[in-house]
Amino acid sequence: MQVRVLGCSGGIGARARTTSFLVDHDILLDAGTGVEDLDLEALARIDHVFLTHSHLDHIAALPLLVDSAGGLRSSPLVVHALPETIAALRAHIFNWVIWPDFTTIPQPDRPWMVFEPIALDQVVTLDGRSFRALPANHTVPALGYQVFNERAALVFSGDTGPNEELWRIANTVPQLRYLIVETAFPDSDHELAVASRHLHPALLAEGLASLRRDVQVLVTHLKPSDRQTIARELAAGAGLHVPRLLERGDLFEL
């Protein structure tokens, strides 16, 4: 199983794309603006999308993906998400005001998209590739994910503030190889990070102090305007774990 980083930025700009990961050729983990760099053939091959939450930077490409590739598909795109996330998408995106409701068109019995609710700690397995819904601490109902097969595992925090349960779970995941964790703000924005339930380097360091695994720690979701400052603060306070900034185009084998 391959996991390719399509986007890992907390904003947009030159070469900055928001959160999305392509698992092999047919599964998306989040659907941020990084999806828009795929060509039409690649878009049509995506069968499943696992969403962490409803915020725009994680779902921005989903409406355009369905619209662009739906007519090329023989089956609906399956979107896995919390019931609260599905409700938000129905109310605020696929509502015929912002975008058509592709769960009812082109025909109610042959839609281009279907929603599949997922619950905390539920595991969905697709051709030997498993996705386990993990807890996240964010301003809306949100998840992280454990992505794994019989050989290795990756844990993705999603958007989260301090999250003791995430570190407890990471310490128990068999064959954990990669930990992708967000750090959106510099330490100077502590109050903003706490209010918006994101991490900054000092908060990440507190979490990493609980990590008892020899894994590669990869930091994602940095705000573009603060990227250099966050990088310096991460390097200064890494402790035993030395995080690396995730980069668009990174490819991981599981």
Image (cartoon, grey):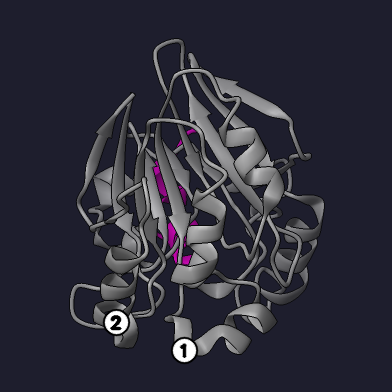
Could you tell me residue 238's position as x and y percent?
A: 35, 57
Residue hosting label 1: 188
Q: Which residues are magenta?
A: 59-76
The residue drawn where x is 41% and y is 74% is 10
Question: How many discs appear?
Answer: 2
Left or right relative to 50: residue 224: left
* Residue 22 vs residue 48, the one in the foreground: 22
Quadrant of the frame with the C terminus: top left
* Front one among 10 and 97: 10
Q: Quadrant of the N terminus?
A: top left
Q: Is 73 within the magenta?
A: yes
Amino acid carrying mark 1 in the image: Ser
Q: State the image coordinates of residue 65 (x, y, percent, origin top left).
A: 43, 58
The reply, left or right, for residue 228 in relation to residue 96 is left
- In the rendered view, would you say 1 is above or below 12? above
Among the 4 quarters of the image, the one containing residue 186: bottom left
Near mark 2 (Cα within 10 A), the count class, few <14, some 14-19 or many ≥20, is some
| Residue 25 lies in the magenta-colored region | no
Task: Determine whether label 2 and label 1 are within 8 Å by CB.
Answer: yes
- Residue depicted at 45% across the width and 19% down the height: 175
Q: Spot the residue most to the top.
A: 150
Amino acid identity at mark 2 = Thr
| Residue at x 70%, y 61% (from the top left corner) | 137
Helix, strand or loop at disc 1? Answer: helix
> Residue 229's spot in the image, x, y percent?
29, 82
Q: Is residue 250 left or right of residue 8?
A: left
Q: Which residue is mark 2?
A: 229
